[in-house]
Amino acid sequence: MAGYGKGESSKGQENKAPQVLGAVQQAFGAQEKGLDKIFEAMTITPEFEKEFGDCYGGMTQMEQKLLSIKTLLPTARKKAAREAEANSKKRKGILDGYRGKAAGKGIPWKESVEKLQNRGMAVWEQERREVTNDKLVYPAYWEIGGAGTLHSYDAGNCCWEQAFDCTLGAYELVHAHHFPEVPAQECFFKLHRELDTVTLSALQGQPPKLALDVGCGTGTSTFSLRETLNAQGYEACHITALDLSTYFLAVANHRLKEGDKKGTPGGLTFKHGNALQTGFNAGEVDIFMASAITHEMPEQASEHLIAEAARVLRPGGVLGYFDLNPVQLLRDNPVSNLVDRIAIANEPFFDEFLAFDFESACRKNGLDIVEIRSTNIEKWPDWEDCSCRMIVARKTCSH
Protein backbone atom coordinates (compact mmCIF):
# COMPACT_ATOMS: atom_id res chain seq x y z
CA MET A 1 0.00 0.00 0.00
CA ALA A 2 2.17 2.81 -1.30
CA GLY A 3 2.21 5.97 0.77
CA TYR A 4 0.60 4.41 3.82
CA GLY A 5 2.47 5.30 6.96
CA LYS A 6 5.84 6.42 5.55
CA GLY A 7 8.29 6.10 8.38
CA GLU A 8 5.59 4.67 10.63
CA SER A 9 6.66 1.04 10.74
CA SER A 10 6.69 -0.33 14.26
CA LYS A 11 9.17 -3.11 13.45
CA GLY A 12 11.62 -3.70 16.23
CA GLN A 13 9.37 -2.56 19.01
CA GLU A 14 8.74 -4.94 21.88
CA ASN A 15 5.53 -6.83 21.47
CA LYS A 16 3.67 -5.70 24.53
CA ALA A 17 -0.05 -5.06 24.67
CA PRO A 18 0.20 -1.44 25.92
CA GLN A 19 2.51 -0.54 23.04
CA VAL A 20 0.16 -2.12 20.53
CA LEU A 21 -2.73 -0.22 22.09
CA GLY A 22 -0.80 3.04 21.79
CA ALA A 23 -0.17 2.46 18.12
CA VAL A 24 -3.84 1.69 17.54
CA GLN A 25 -4.96 4.82 19.37
CA GLN A 26 -2.51 6.95 17.42
CA ALA A 27 -3.62 5.48 14.09
CA PHE A 28 -7.34 5.64 14.80
CA GLY A 29 -7.36 9.11 16.32
CA ALA A 30 -9.00 10.33 19.47
CA GLN A 31 -12.22 11.19 17.63
CA GLU A 32 -13.08 7.55 17.09
CA LYS A 33 -15.46 5.72 19.38
CA GLY A 34 -18.01 2.90 19.51
CA LEU A 35 -17.38 0.61 16.56
CA ASP A 36 -13.80 1.84 16.37
CA LYS A 37 -13.05 0.39 19.80
CA ILE A 38 -14.10 -3.16 18.97
CA PHE A 39 -10.98 -4.11 17.07
CA GLU A 40 -8.82 -2.19 19.52
CA ALA A 41 -10.21 -4.27 22.38
CA MET A 42 -9.31 -7.46 20.56
CA THR A 43 -5.72 -6.42 19.88
CA ILE A 44 -4.91 -5.87 23.56
CA THR A 45 -5.96 -9.35 24.67
CA PRO A 46 -3.16 -11.73 25.67
CA GLU A 47 -4.45 -14.25 23.14
CA PHE A 48 -4.12 -11.80 20.25
CA GLU A 49 -0.70 -10.71 21.44
CA LYS A 50 0.52 -14.29 21.67
CA GLU A 51 -0.80 -15.32 18.25
CA PHE A 52 -0.37 -12.17 16.16
CA GLY A 53 1.76 -9.73 18.17
CA ASP A 54 4.88 -9.97 15.98
CA CYS A 55 2.90 -9.67 12.75
CA TYR A 56 0.64 -6.89 13.95
CA GLY A 57 3.45 -4.94 15.56
CA GLY A 58 5.35 -4.99 12.26
CA MET A 59 2.55 -3.30 10.35
CA THR A 60 2.37 0.41 9.66
CA GLN A 61 -0.40 2.26 11.41
CA MET A 62 -2.41 2.54 8.22
CA GLU A 63 -2.06 -1.18 7.56
CA GLN A 64 -3.38 -1.79 11.06
CA LYS A 65 -6.30 0.50 10.38
CA LEU A 66 -7.15 -1.23 7.11
CA LEU A 67 -6.97 -4.59 8.86
CA SER A 68 -9.50 -3.41 11.42
CA ILE A 69 -11.87 -2.35 8.64
CA LYS A 70 -11.62 -5.71 6.90
CA THR A 71 -12.09 -7.56 10.19
CA LEU A 72 -15.29 -5.71 11.08
CA LEU A 73 -16.83 -5.71 7.60
CA PRO A 74 -18.36 -9.23 7.45
CA THR A 75 -20.44 -8.63 10.57
CA ALA A 76 -21.29 -5.08 9.54
CA ARG A 77 -22.52 -6.35 6.17
CA LYS A 78 -24.75 -8.94 7.81
CA LYS A 79 -26.19 -6.25 10.05
CA ALA A 80 -26.78 -4.00 7.04
CA ALA A 81 -28.54 -6.83 5.19
CA ARG A 82 -30.94 -7.26 8.10
CA GLU A 83 -31.66 -3.52 7.97
CA ALA A 84 -32.05 -3.27 4.20
CA GLU A 85 -35.17 -1.13 4.25
CA ALA A 86 -33.73 1.30 6.76
CA ASN A 87 -30.52 1.56 4.75
CA SER A 88 -32.49 2.26 1.58
CA LYS A 89 -34.14 5.18 3.39
CA LYS A 90 -30.73 6.25 4.65
CA ARG A 91 -29.35 6.34 1.10
CA LYS A 92 -32.38 8.34 -0.05
CA GLY A 93 -31.78 10.77 2.78
CA ILE A 94 -28.18 11.21 1.69
CA LEU A 95 -29.28 12.00 -1.86
CA ASP A 96 -31.95 14.45 -0.71
CA GLY A 97 -29.36 16.17 1.45
CA TYR A 98 -27.02 16.53 -1.53
CA ARG A 99 -29.80 17.96 -3.65
CA GLY A 100 -30.61 20.53 -1.02
CA LYS A 101 -26.96 21.56 -0.77
CA ALA A 102 -26.73 21.84 -4.55
CA ALA A 103 -29.60 24.31 -4.65
CA GLY A 104 -27.87 26.37 -1.99
CA LYS A 105 -24.72 26.55 -4.13
CA GLY A 106 -26.60 27.62 -7.23
CA ILE A 107 -26.25 24.27 -8.99
CA PRO A 108 -29.45 23.67 -11.06
CA TRP A 109 -29.53 19.95 -10.25
CA LYS A 110 -33.32 19.72 -10.02
CA GLU A 111 -33.88 21.76 -13.19
CA SER A 112 -31.39 19.65 -15.15
CA VAL A 113 -33.06 16.40 -14.12
CA GLU A 114 -36.54 17.69 -14.94
CA LYS A 115 -35.40 18.78 -18.40
CA LEU A 116 -34.11 15.28 -19.13
CA GLN A 117 -37.20 13.60 -17.68
CA ASN A 118 -39.49 15.74 -19.83
CA ARG A 119 -38.20 14.03 -22.98
CA GLY A 120 -40.32 11.06 -21.91
CA MET A 121 -39.17 7.71 -20.56
CA ALA A 122 -40.27 5.86 -23.70
CA VAL A 123 -37.78 7.96 -25.68
CA TRP A 124 -35.03 7.27 -23.21
CA GLU A 125 -35.67 3.52 -23.19
CA GLN A 126 -35.56 3.41 -26.98
CA GLU A 127 -32.25 5.25 -27.02
CA ARG A 128 -30.88 2.96 -24.34
CA ARG A 129 -31.74 -0.07 -26.45
CA GLU A 130 -29.91 1.51 -29.38
CA VAL A 131 -26.64 1.82 -27.47
CA THR A 132 -26.84 -1.64 -25.90
CA ASN A 133 -24.36 -4.30 -27.01
CA ASP A 134 -26.18 -7.56 -26.32
CA LYS A 135 -22.95 -9.53 -26.78
CA LEU A 136 -20.97 -7.58 -24.19
CA VAL A 137 -19.40 -9.70 -21.47
CA TYR A 138 -19.74 -7.89 -18.15
CA PRO A 139 -16.99 -8.21 -15.52
CA ALA A 140 -17.90 -10.39 -12.56
CA TYR A 141 -18.07 -7.51 -10.08
CA TRP A 142 -20.72 -5.61 -12.07
CA GLU A 143 -23.66 -7.51 -10.62
CA ILE A 144 -22.74 -6.18 -7.17
CA GLY A 145 -20.92 -2.94 -7.92
CA GLY A 146 -22.83 -1.75 -10.96
CA ALA A 147 -26.32 -3.18 -11.12
CA GLY A 148 -26.33 -3.51 -7.34
CA THR A 149 -26.49 -0.75 -4.77
CA LEU A 150 -23.93 1.99 -5.37
CA HIS A 151 -23.52 5.68 -4.51
CA SER A 152 -26.77 5.86 -2.55
CA TYR A 153 -28.81 4.44 -5.46
CA ASP A 154 -30.54 1.13 -4.81
CA ALA A 155 -30.13 0.19 -8.49
CA GLY A 156 -26.57 1.46 -8.72
CA ASN A 157 -25.39 2.58 -12.15
CA CYS A 158 -28.30 0.86 -13.86
CA CYS A 159 -31.07 3.39 -13.35
CA TRP A 160 -32.26 6.63 -14.89
CA GLU A 161 -32.16 8.42 -11.55
CA GLN A 162 -28.38 8.27 -11.27
CA ALA A 163 -27.86 8.82 -15.01
CA PHE A 164 -29.86 12.05 -14.86
CA ASP A 165 -28.24 13.14 -11.60
CA CYS A 166 -24.73 12.63 -12.97
CA THR A 167 -25.32 14.86 -15.98
CA LEU A 168 -25.36 17.98 -13.86
CA GLY A 169 -25.43 18.38 -10.12
CA ALA A 170 -24.09 15.35 -8.27
CA TYR A 171 -20.49 15.47 -9.46
CA GLU A 172 -20.33 19.23 -9.34
CA LEU A 173 -21.49 19.34 -5.74
CA VAL A 174 -19.17 16.58 -4.52
CA HIS A 175 -16.09 18.22 -6.04
CA ALA A 176 -16.95 21.89 -5.50
CA HIS A 177 -14.41 22.20 -2.66
CA HIS A 178 -11.44 21.54 -4.93
CA PHE A 179 -11.58 25.01 -6.47
CA PRO A 180 -13.68 27.13 -4.10
CA GLU A 181 -12.62 30.34 -5.83
CA VAL A 182 -14.77 29.53 -8.88
CA PRO A 183 -18.52 28.79 -9.15
CA ALA A 184 -19.45 25.21 -8.31
CA GLN A 185 -20.41 24.36 -11.89
CA GLU A 186 -17.08 25.57 -13.22
CA CYS A 187 -15.14 23.74 -10.53
CA PHE A 188 -15.69 20.25 -11.92
CA PHE A 189 -14.79 21.38 -15.43
CA LYS A 190 -11.62 22.97 -14.07
CA LEU A 191 -10.72 19.75 -12.29
CA HIS A 192 -10.99 17.74 -15.51
CA ARG A 193 -9.09 20.35 -17.50
CA GLU A 194 -6.24 20.00 -15.00
CA LEU A 195 -6.19 16.23 -15.55
CA ASP A 196 -6.34 16.59 -19.33
CA THR A 197 -3.53 19.12 -19.39
CA VAL A 198 -1.07 17.20 -17.21
CA THR A 199 -1.83 13.99 -19.11
CA LEU A 200 -1.26 15.49 -22.55
CA SER A 201 1.92 17.21 -21.39
CA ALA A 202 3.40 13.78 -20.61
CA LEU A 203 2.66 12.36 -24.08
CA GLN A 204 5.76 11.47 -26.11
CA GLY A 205 6.23 10.62 -29.78
CA GLN A 206 3.70 11.16 -32.54
CA PRO A 207 0.65 13.43 -32.17
CA PRO A 208 -2.27 11.47 -30.69
CA LYS A 209 -4.60 9.74 -33.11
CA LEU A 210 -6.72 7.70 -30.68
CA ALA A 211 -7.80 8.38 -27.11
CA LEU A 212 -9.79 6.01 -24.92
CA ASP A 213 -11.92 7.22 -21.99
CA VAL A 214 -13.07 4.27 -19.87
CA GLY A 215 -15.91 4.47 -17.37
CA CYS A 216 -17.05 7.61 -19.15
CA GLY A 217 -20.42 7.86 -17.40
CA THR A 218 -22.58 10.54 -18.98
CA GLY A 219 -19.58 12.04 -20.73
CA THR A 220 -18.27 14.72 -18.38
CA SER A 221 -14.66 13.50 -18.56
CA THR A 222 -15.00 12.71 -22.28
CA PHE A 223 -16.27 16.12 -23.33
CA SER A 224 -13.55 17.75 -21.26
CA LEU A 225 -10.88 15.70 -23.02
CA ARG A 226 -12.41 16.47 -26.42
CA GLU A 227 -12.31 20.19 -25.72
CA THR A 228 -8.75 20.06 -24.38
CA LEU A 229 -7.52 18.11 -27.41
CA ASN A 230 -9.18 20.63 -29.70
CA ALA A 231 -7.62 23.55 -27.83
CA GLN A 232 -4.16 22.00 -28.23
CA GLY A 233 -4.55 21.41 -31.96
CA TYR A 234 -5.41 17.71 -31.77
CA GLU A 235 -8.89 17.83 -33.26
CA ALA A 236 -7.95 14.90 -35.53
CA CYS A 237 -7.53 12.65 -32.47
CA HIS A 238 -10.59 10.43 -32.17
CA ILE A 239 -12.01 9.59 -28.74
CA THR A 240 -13.79 6.34 -27.97
CA ALA A 241 -15.58 6.43 -24.63
CA LEU A 242 -16.62 3.19 -22.93
CA ASP A 243 -19.07 2.48 -20.14
CA LEU A 244 -20.91 -0.56 -18.82
CA SER A 245 -24.09 1.38 -18.04
CA THR A 246 -26.44 1.79 -20.99
CA TYR A 247 -28.32 4.40 -18.95
CA PHE A 248 -25.24 6.58 -18.74
CA LEU A 249 -24.41 6.04 -22.41
CA ALA A 250 -27.90 7.00 -23.57
CA VAL A 251 -27.57 10.31 -21.71
CA ALA A 252 -24.04 10.88 -23.05
CA ASN A 253 -25.21 10.30 -26.62
CA HIS A 254 -28.12 12.67 -26.10
CA ARG A 255 -25.77 15.36 -24.83
CA LEU A 256 -23.62 14.97 -27.94
CA LYS A 257 -26.42 14.83 -30.50
CA GLU A 258 -29.11 17.12 -29.06
CA GLY A 259 -28.06 18.40 -25.65
CA ASP A 260 -25.56 20.76 -24.07
CA LYS A 261 -22.58 19.39 -26.08
CA LYS A 262 -24.25 19.36 -29.49
CA GLY A 263 -21.90 20.50 -32.23
CA THR A 264 -18.70 19.68 -30.33
CA PRO A 265 -16.01 19.37 -33.04
CA GLY A 266 -13.75 16.34 -33.34
CA GLY A 267 -14.37 12.61 -33.51
CA LEU A 268 -16.18 11.15 -30.52
CA THR A 269 -17.93 7.81 -30.08
CA PHE A 270 -19.73 6.54 -27.00
CA LYS A 271 -19.71 2.75 -26.84
CA HIS A 272 -21.14 0.06 -24.59
CA GLY A 273 -17.91 -1.59 -23.53
CA ASN A 274 -15.79 -3.12 -20.79
CA ALA A 275 -12.73 -1.19 -19.57
CA LEU A 276 -11.03 -4.45 -18.61
CA GLN A 277 -11.37 -5.84 -22.15
CA THR A 278 -11.54 -2.84 -24.45
CA GLY A 279 -11.23 -4.73 -27.73
CA PHE A 280 -8.46 -2.47 -29.04
CA ASN A 281 -5.23 -3.84 -30.47
CA ALA A 282 -1.98 -3.82 -28.52
CA GLY A 283 -0.17 -0.51 -28.90
CA GLU A 284 -3.08 1.13 -30.72
CA VAL A 285 -3.99 3.82 -28.18
CA ASP A 286 -2.18 7.09 -27.50
CA ILE A 287 -4.16 8.28 -24.46
CA PHE A 288 -5.97 6.12 -21.89
CA MET A 289 -8.14 8.07 -19.44
CA ALA A 290 -9.74 6.57 -16.32
CA SER A 291 -11.65 9.01 -14.11
CA ALA A 292 -13.39 8.11 -10.84
CA ILE A 293 -13.94 4.43 -11.50
CA THR A 294 -11.47 2.40 -9.41
CA HIS A 295 -13.23 3.25 -6.13
CA GLU A 296 -16.17 1.25 -7.52
CA MET A 297 -14.06 -1.81 -8.37
CA PRO A 298 -12.53 -4.73 -6.46
CA GLU A 299 -8.77 -4.86 -6.27
CA GLN A 300 -8.37 -7.57 -8.91
CA ALA A 301 -10.46 -5.60 -11.41
CA SER A 302 -8.28 -2.54 -10.84
CA GLU A 303 -5.22 -4.70 -11.52
CA HIS A 304 -6.81 -5.81 -14.79
CA LEU A 305 -7.62 -2.21 -15.69
CA ILE A 306 -3.97 -1.16 -15.40
CA ALA A 307 -2.87 -4.22 -17.36
CA GLU A 308 -5.33 -3.39 -20.14
CA ALA A 309 -4.17 0.22 -20.26
CA ALA A 310 -0.57 -0.95 -20.58
CA ARG A 311 -1.52 -3.44 -23.30
CA VAL A 312 -3.33 -1.01 -25.58
CA LEU A 313 -1.03 1.99 -25.08
CA ARG A 314 1.81 2.54 -27.54
CA PRO A 315 5.30 3.31 -26.20
CA GLY A 316 5.22 6.98 -25.23
CA GLY A 317 1.45 6.81 -24.74
CA VAL A 318 -0.02 8.00 -21.45
CA LEU A 319 -2.47 6.94 -18.78
CA GLY A 320 -4.37 9.78 -17.10
CA TYR A 321 -6.02 8.74 -13.84
CA PHE A 322 -8.23 10.54 -11.35
CA ASP A 323 -10.04 9.18 -8.29
CA LEU A 324 -10.45 9.46 -4.56
CA ASN A 325 -7.23 9.48 -2.57
CA PRO A 326 -6.95 6.28 -0.49
CA VAL A 327 -4.05 7.66 1.55
CA GLN A 328 -5.99 10.68 2.80
CA LEU A 329 -9.25 8.77 3.20
CA LEU A 330 -7.73 6.01 5.30
CA ARG A 331 -5.62 8.40 7.35
CA ASP A 332 -8.28 10.99 8.17
CA ASN A 333 -11.51 8.98 8.51
CA PRO A 334 -12.65 6.96 11.53
CA VAL A 335 -12.88 3.23 11.01
CA SER A 336 -16.60 3.37 11.80
CA ASN A 337 -17.28 5.79 8.94
CA LEU A 338 -15.44 3.68 6.40
CA VAL A 339 -17.02 0.42 7.58
CA ASP A 340 -20.50 1.93 7.37
CA ARG A 341 -19.82 3.35 3.90
CA ILE A 342 -18.90 -0.10 2.64
CA ALA A 343 -21.42 -2.16 4.61
CA ILE A 344 -24.49 -0.25 3.38
CA ALA A 345 -23.05 -0.66 -0.13
CA ASN A 346 -22.53 2.98 -1.00
CA GLU A 347 -19.18 1.69 -2.28
CA PRO A 348 -19.25 -2.09 -1.80
CA PHE A 349 -15.58 -2.62 -2.77
CA PHE A 350 -14.17 0.42 -0.99
CA ASP A 351 -11.99 -1.63 1.37
CA GLU A 352 -10.28 -3.17 -1.66
CA PHE A 353 -9.85 0.26 -3.23
CA LEU A 354 -8.15 1.48 -0.05
CA ALA A 355 -5.74 -1.47 -0.25
CA PHE A 356 -4.98 -1.23 -3.97
CA ASP A 357 -1.45 -0.07 -4.78
CA PHE A 358 -1.98 1.81 -8.03
CA GLU A 359 1.64 2.86 -8.40
CA SER A 360 2.99 -0.69 -8.05
CA ALA A 361 0.43 -1.98 -10.56
CA CYS A 362 1.64 0.61 -13.08
CA ARG A 363 5.29 -0.28 -12.62
CA LYS A 364 4.54 -3.99 -12.83
CA ASN A 365 2.91 -3.44 -16.23
CA GLY A 366 5.62 -1.27 -17.75
CA LEU A 367 4.09 2.11 -16.98
CA ASP A 368 6.38 4.72 -15.45
CA ILE A 369 4.80 7.17 -13.02
CA VAL A 370 5.30 10.69 -14.40
CA GLU A 371 3.42 12.61 -11.74
CA ILE A 372 1.21 12.16 -8.69
CA ARG A 373 -0.52 15.35 -7.63
CA SER A 374 -3.52 16.82 -5.90
CA THR A 375 -6.38 18.31 -7.87
CA ASN A 376 -5.39 21.82 -6.79
CA ILE A 377 -1.68 22.17 -6.06
CA GLU A 378 -2.04 25.63 -4.55
CA LYS A 379 -4.56 24.38 -2.02
CA TRP A 380 -2.85 21.01 -1.39
CA PRO A 381 0.89 21.14 -2.21
CA ASP A 382 1.20 17.62 -0.79
CA TRP A 383 -1.12 15.28 -2.70
CA GLU A 384 -1.53 13.06 0.36
CA ASP A 385 -3.60 15.82 1.99
CA CYS A 386 -6.16 16.05 -0.83
CA SER A 387 -9.33 13.95 -0.89
CA CYS A 388 -8.65 13.09 -4.56
CA ARG A 389 -5.49 12.57 -6.56
CA MET A 390 -4.33 12.58 -10.15
CA ILE A 391 -1.74 10.16 -11.49
CA VAL A 392 -0.09 10.31 -14.91
CA ALA A 393 1.88 7.30 -16.15
CA ARG A 394 3.66 6.71 -19.43
CA LYS A 395 4.41 3.49 -21.28
CA THR A 396 8.09 3.16 -21.96
CA CYS A 397 8.32 -0.38 -23.24
CA SER A 398 6.20 -3.01 -25.00
CA HIS A 399 4.27 -5.09 -22.53
Image: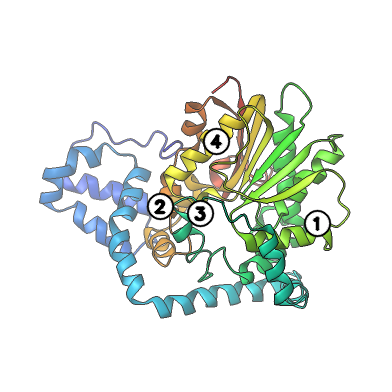
Q: In the rendered structure, which disc, 2 or 4, sits on the residue that comes first in sequence?
A: 4
Q: In the rendered structure, which disc, 2 or 3, sits on the residue that comes first in sequence?
A: 3
Q: Residue 53, position in %: x, y?
A: 18, 42
What kind of element bears circle 3? helix
Q: In the rendered structure, which disc, 3 or 1, sits on the residue that comes first in sequence?
A: 1
Q: CA distance from mark 2 to mark 3?
A: 10 Å
Query: Which mark is nearer the camera, 2 or 3?
Result: 3
Q: Residue 44, position in %: x, y?
A: 18, 52
Residue at (75% x, 58% y) in the render? 253
Q: Residue 341, position in %: x, y?
A: 44, 63
290 left or right of 364 in image: right
Labelled pair 2, 4 in contact (Cβ < 8 Å):
no
Q: CA distance from mark 2 to mark 4?
A: 23 Å
15 left or right of 310 in image: left
Labelled pair 2, 1 in contact (Cβ < 8 Å):
no
Q: In the rendered structure, which disc, 3 or 4, sits on the residue that comes first in sequence?
A: 3
Label 2: which residue?
351
**Figure quadrant of residue 209:** top right
Label 3: which residue?
296
Q: CA distance from mark 3 to mark 1?
A: 26 Å
Q: CA distance from mark 4 to mark 1?
A: 27 Å
Q: In the rendered structure, which disc, 2 or 1, sits on the residue that comes first in sequence?
A: 1
Q: In the rendered structure, which disc, 4 or 1, sits on the residue that comes first in sequence?
A: 1
Label 4: which residue?
308
Query: Which mark is nearer the camera, 2 or 4?
Result: 4
Near-viewer residue (281 or 151):
281
Vertical comparison of 189 with 38: above or below: above
In this view of the protein, can residue 192 be seen by the observer?
yes
